[in-house]
Amino acid sequence: MTSHASRKISAPGEVFEFYMDYTKRPLTLHQQVEKLRSRGLLIDDEQLTERYLSNISYYRLRAYTYPFQDNTNPKADHKFKKDDIHFSDIVDLYCFDRRLRSLMFNAIEKIEVAVRAKIVQAYSEATGNSHWFNDRNLYKHKDILDRNGQPTTAYDLLMKDVEGEIKRSN
């Protein structure tokens, strides 16, 4: 049995810890393959399946098996709903998701850079100052709480973040 400590922040300045006991024993790669097979997943190449499980992990791939399994009936033990689902189908879905995520992040990055450039250009032209972000008067002066629950302003938070980024990059 293994104990695992977790920390949770419930409110600023308030932290509590809790422990969970795990009674499940770790499964070997062969046992993981057998578990998938016993639930109705078709395994065409056991060695290849073990390699995928070794490199990707059973639990990461488990997320891609979930929609094809009976997860509502505890007695069903996550059996596959159809009898024609292959492990390779799950890997294909995982690979599709990985490629889609990569395309999405690439597109989001381009949008982020373009929006940032537009903001910098607009404020630089409007203020006549390329370092307009240093002008405290452009920010709301409303007090907000920082990560430690201390009162601060948006300007002070931004300057602290900018300073941290400069230190990190040097």
Image (spheres, rainbow, N blue to C red):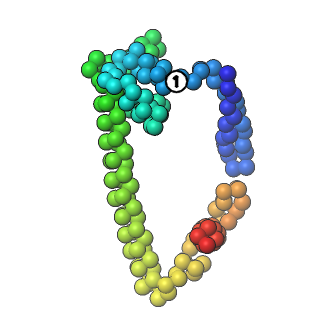
Q: Position of residue 23 (x, y in %)?
A: 63, 20
- Does residue 159 sit above or below 83 in this rendering? below
Horizontal and vertical percent position of residue 150: 72, 60
The residue nearer to you, when weighing 118 against 68, is: 68
Residue 111 image-quadrant placement: bottom left
Which structural element holds mark 1? loop
- What count of labels does the image hold? 1
Question: What residue is pinned by disc 1?
Answer: 28
Q: Give left or right: position of 136 versus 126.
A: right
Q: Amino acid at mark 1?
A: Thr
Q: Does 127 sit left or right of 16 as displayed?
A: left
User: Residue drawn 41% across and 34% down?
Assistant: 52
Quarter of the image for the N terminus: give it.
Answer: top right
**Which quadrant of the figure has residue 91?**
top left
Q: Quadrant of the C terminus?
A: bottom right
Q: In this rendering, is residue 17 above or below 72?
A: below
Could you tell me which residue is drawn at 34 percent across and 31 percent down?
90
Q: Residue furthest bottom?
A: 128
Q: Could you say which is closer to the camera, residue 56 or residue 117?
A: 56
Residue situated furthest left in the rendering: 84
Spot occupied by residue 56 in the image (x, y as percentages of width and height): 45, 37
Residue 98 in sight from this viewpoint: yes
Q: Is residue 158 visible?
A: no
- x then y, percent, for residue 39: 39, 16
Left or right, 145 with reference to 81: right
- Residue 40 to residue 56: above or below: above
